[in-house]
């Protein structure tokens, strides 16, 4: 037996060493590099170089008379984590953090359920003209500025001659001072967020649905599957990768908020609406424009958002990768 094994080993041809293929710069590499150059320059100038400013979070920034920004920055006193202690010690910090997280949790759920549902419904409309019309109507709010939208909302909610109060009085009710009644604003903000973003996210899912093989639906119809069963067993499982990707990206922004929504629509996020509309982004802006809070403290608040957001998105991606590596971002 041992002799046979030795004979077989001897009969095998010697392994040839594979030559490593040398990488060679090609014309395609040159063309692609030229195409990527403007984007690379843009990112370096406007994304990476400004990151030098995070040093402000660890300094008590004070302007040196007659000096430029960098001279003032290097002459400012190094205070370590004192700016972070100030931010975390704010009386309304727990409330701001709660608002930011809770609103985003609601937005994450609605931004998946509603757009996916609408995308499935529109994909089943046989008339192409009607389908395109619905897509356009739902997509239009995405291009509108929150400043413009805030005036539309004001026309509806202004106490004296607002459309909603006019309707309420027509049916015998009393006028509601919307801008001084906080209890209504969580619902108003959620409705406005869905109204503005649902069209864009629906188009993303609709584009994925168009890429699903039609033969799957044809086979399901032959087997007697209903539209609901087709959506449950074909469409939604096929959308799983894009849903997971959108979920991870949304979780990464859970400590951020739509500044235009919370500040512009509420007309400045001032009292008495502050307890329900104040978020981290709104607070950073108010600190920045107050004139009494140093730039270092404002930078510390922004850096906290960025770091925690990065940790959150990496954690969410790690959890997804553990259960479904193919659906993870990295």
Image (spheres, grey):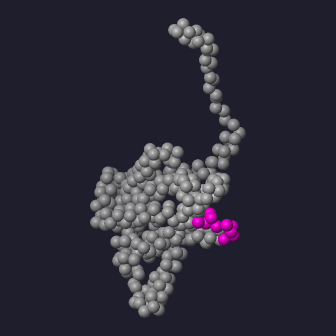
29 and 108: which one is in front?
108
Question: Residue 286 placed where, x, y %?
Answer: 39, 68
Question: Residue 231 placed where, x, y %?
Answer: 56, 59
Tell me which residue sits at (47%, 72%) in the image.
Answer: 191
In the picture, measured across the screen, residue 241 lies left or right of residue 127, that is: left
Tell me which residue sits at (71%, 39%) in the image.
Answer: 27
Tell me which residue sits at (43%, 86%) in the image.
Answer: 159
Q: Can residue 72 be seen by looking at this rendering?
A: no
Q: How many marks?
A: 0
In the picture, measured across the screen, residue 108 lies left or right of residue 301, that is: right
Q: Vertical placement of 166 versus 44: above or below? A: below
Q: Residue furthest top?
A: 3
Residue 214 lies in what quarter of the image?
A: bottom right
15 and 177: which one is in front?
15
Q: Is residue 122 magenta?
A: yes
Residue 148 lies in what quarter of the image?
A: bottom right
In the picture, measured across the screen, residue 322 lies left or right of residue 131, that is: left
Q: Residue furthest right?
A: 27
Question: Residue 88 placed where, x, y %?
Answer: 31, 59
Residue 285 lies in what quarter of the image?
A: bottom left
Q: Can residue 234 be seen by looking at this rendering?
A: yes
In the picture, measured across the screen, residue 228 lies left or right of residue 177, that is: right
Question: Residue 175 placed where, x, y %?
Answer: 41, 88
Main SS category, magenta section: helix
63 and 311: which one is in front?
311
Tell me which residue sits at (61%, 66%) in the image.
Answer: 122
Task: State which region is magenta.
Answer: 121-130
164 and 287: which one is in front?
164
Q: Is residue 104 magenta?
A: no
């Amino acid at each position: 037996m041992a002799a046979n094994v030795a004979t077989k080993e001897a009969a095998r041809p010697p392994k040839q060493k594979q030559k490593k293929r040398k990488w060679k710069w090609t014309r395609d590499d040159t063309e692609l590099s030229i195409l990527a150059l403007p984007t690379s320059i843009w990112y370096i100038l406007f994304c990476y170089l400004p990151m030098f400013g995070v040093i402000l979070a660890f300094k008590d920034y004070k302007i040196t008379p007659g000096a430029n920004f960098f001279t003032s920055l290097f002459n400012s006193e190094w205070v370590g984590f004192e700016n972070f202690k100030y931010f975390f010690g704010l009386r309304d910090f727990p409330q701001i953090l709660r608002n930011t997280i809770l609103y985003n949790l609601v937005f994450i759920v609605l931004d998946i359920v509603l757009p996916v549902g609408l995308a499935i419904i529109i994909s089943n409309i046989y008339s192409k003209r009607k389908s395109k019309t619905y897509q356009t109507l739902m997509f239009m709010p995405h291009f509108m500025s929150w400043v413009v939208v805030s005036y539309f909302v004001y026309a509806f909610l202004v106490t004296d001659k607002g459309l909603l109060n006019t309707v309420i009085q027509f049916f015998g009710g009393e006028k509601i001072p919307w801008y001084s009644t906080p209890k209504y604003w969580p619902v108003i903000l959620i409705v406005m967020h869905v109204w503005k973003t649902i069209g864009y996210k629906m188009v993303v899912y609709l584009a994925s649905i168009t890429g699903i093989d039609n033969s799957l639906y044809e086979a399901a119809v032959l087997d007697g599957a209903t539209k609901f069963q087709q959506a449950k067993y074909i469409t939604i499982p096929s959308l799983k990768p894009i849903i997971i990707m959108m979920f991870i990206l949304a979780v990464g922004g859970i400590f951020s908020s739509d500044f235009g929504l919370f500040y512009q629509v509420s007309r400045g996020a001032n009292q008495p609406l502050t307890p329900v509309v104040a978020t981290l982004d709104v607070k950073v802006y108010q600190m920045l424009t107050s004139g009494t809070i140093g730039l270092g403290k404002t930078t510390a608040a922004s850096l906290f958002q960025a770091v925690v957001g990065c940790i959150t998105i990496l954690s969410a991606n790690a959890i997804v990768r553990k259960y479904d590596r193919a659906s993870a971002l990295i």
